[in-house]
Image: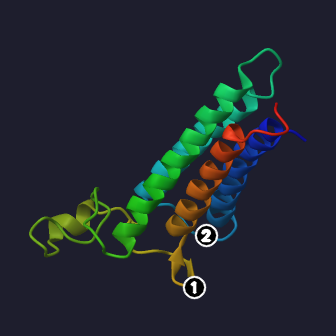
Amino acid sequence: MTNLSKARALALLIPAALLAGAWGSQLIGGLYPCEMCHWQRWPHYAALVIALLAFVPAMPTRLLVALAAIAIAVSGAIGVAHAGVEYHWWQGFTACTKTSGSGSITLDDLMKAPIVRCDQPQWSLFGISLAGFNAIISLSGALVIFGLLLRRGRAG
């Protein structure tokens, strides 16, 4: 298997696996996504479509795999931002965090707040939330894909 074939396969499998995990957690595990969780899914949807196109003959495979890797990395970057909000390293970017700009919760804040908050992880393993796992897997996966695309040897 060539490096390009490996990169193309990873560009398809990484977003497919992460989206399957997200949807499985939601539909089977009852973990409903917050707004920032949805933000992380969109680049994976794009990566999945782009990676599928890379399997079509006469398409620019290397370019499409690189674009899919970029989309995967974007999801990872959003995962870093979301994990930072969950770990309270920085303030949230949306209304799905617990406090308003004043630092206190008002009745108006509660009435406008979504049911699932972005600053409270619903699940974690070894202290890493789902957003954190998405960041780790997506960014690592994108680096591996780029490494395979740049690697010389069994060209493809």
Instruction: Identify which residue is drawn at 50% across, 65% down.
Output: 131
Q: Secondary structure at mark 2?
A: loop
Residue 40 picture location, percent across and down? 50, 52
> Which residue is drawn at the image coordinates 73% and 26% (left, top)?
61
Question: Which quadrant of the view contains residue 111?
Answer: bottom left
Against 97, residue 154 (above or below) is above
In this orientation, which residue lies closer to the viewer: 82 or 67? 67
Q: In the current view of this chain or complex, which residue is farthest to the front?
A: 153
Whichever of labels 1 and 2 marks the residue nearer the N terminus, that label is: 2
Q: What amino acid does circle 2 point to?
A: Gly
The residue that mark 2 highlights is 30
Q: Amino acid at mark 1?
A: Phe
Is the residue marked by circle 1 packed among few (<14), some (14-19), or many (20+) residues within 10 Å?
few
The answer to whether any part of residue 117 appears in the image is no
Q: Which mark is residue 126?
A: 1
Q: Is residue 124 above or below residue 24?
A: below
Q: Determine the image quadrant of residue 27.
A: bottom right
Q: Which mark is residue 69?
A: none
Q: Is residue 86 visible?
A: yes
Residue 149 left/right relative to 39:
right
Q: 127 or 93, which is in the foreground? A: 127
* Residue 121 to residue 152: above or below: below
Instruction: Decide which of 76, 43 is in the foreground and name it.
Output: 76
**Could you classify mark 2 by the number of other residues whose Cα lies within 10 Å: few (under 14), some (14-19), or many (20 or more)?**
few
**Which residue is painted at 37% across and 76% down in the image?**
87
x, y percent for residue 59? 74, 18
